[in-house]
Amino acid sequence: MNNLTLISPANNSYTETPDSYSKNFQTNRKVDFLSTEQLYNAVFENAFHSMYIGNPNGNILRFNEKLLKLFGYAEWEMKQNHYSDLFDIYDQSFIDFFNERKTKGIAKAELMGIKKSGDKFPCRISSVIYETDDGNKRSMNTVVNLSRSLESRWNIAG
C-alpha cells in the first residue's frame, strides 16, 4: 500500500496510510503540511539542477550552489548578475523563449548559456512566472547543461 509522508515543522515527519489520511479529515484532526515557502526552499536547495529566482527586471535574486558551479561565478558575483550575463539574449531561441514566457507565464527552451569565462554552452531552461505572497512578480528558472548530452549523441553517431 502506498504511504503518504507529511512533513510537519512542529514534529518533523510522520507517515500515514491513505486510509488513516482520509480518516484525519473526517475527524477534523489537524494535519500539518509544509508551508509554500518551506516547500519552495526544500525543492530549491535540494534540486539536482541549477536554479535561480529572477525579477521582471532580469536581476538574479536567489540561486542555488549548482548555478554557481555551472556558470563559474562566486556567490558575490552572481548576486550582481543579470540574466543577460548568463544567456545569449540576442539569440533567436532566447527571444522566442522570453516571448513565450511573457505570453503564457511558463516556457522552456534550448539555448546558449555563457560562463563567466565567456565560453558558451548549450543548455535547457525551464521557467515559470509566479507572484509572491506580497504581490511581487518572480520567475523560477531551472537550467540544465546539455554539453555532455550532446557529446554523447555525437559519440554514438560516430
Image (tube, rainbow, N blue to C red):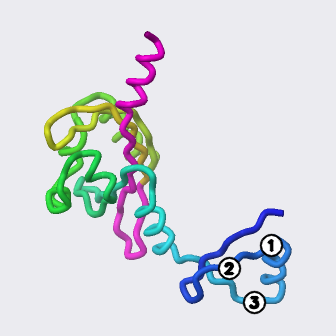
* Mark closest to the chain's N terminus, 1 or 3: 1
Spatial CA distance of label 1 from label 3 is 15 Å
Q: Is residue 116 above or below residue 92?
A: below
Q: Residues within 10 Å of mark 3 (few under 14, many from 20)?
A: few
Query: Callout 2: few (<14), some (14-19), or many (20+) C-alpha neighbours within 10 Å?
Result: few
Q: Residue at x 18, y 33 (%)?
A: 119
Q: Which residue is mark 3?
A: 29
Tag nearer the camera, 1 or 3: 1
Query: Can you say which quadrant of the picture contains the N terminus?
Result: bottom right
Q: Which residue is mark 1?
A: 17
Q: Is residue 131 above or below residue 158?
A: below
Left or right of 37? Residue 17 is: right
Q: Position of residue 92 (x, y in %)?
A: 29, 28
Q: Which residues make up the magenta segment?
A: 129-158
| Label 3 to label 2: alpha-carbon separation | 14 Å
Q: 100 or 9, which lies in front?
A: 9
**Depth check, front residue: 126 or 18:** 18
Q: Where is residue 56? Give x, y as percent.
A: 28, 56
Query: Which kind of residue does numbered mark 3 sit on?
Result: Arg
The quarter of the displayed image where residue 52 is located: bottom left
Of tags 3 and 2, which is closer to the observer? 2
Label 2, secondary structure: give it. Answer: strand
Contact (Cβ within 8 Å) of mark 3 with mark 2: no
Given the image, on which type of amino acid does mark 1 rest? Answer: Thr
Please give left or right for residue 147 compared with residue 5 in the image: left
User: How far apart are the two marked residues, 1 and 2, measured between alpha carbons?
Assistant: 10 Å
Residue 79 lies in what quarter of the image? bottom left
Say which element carries label 1: loop
Q: Which residue carries the number 2 mark?
A: 14
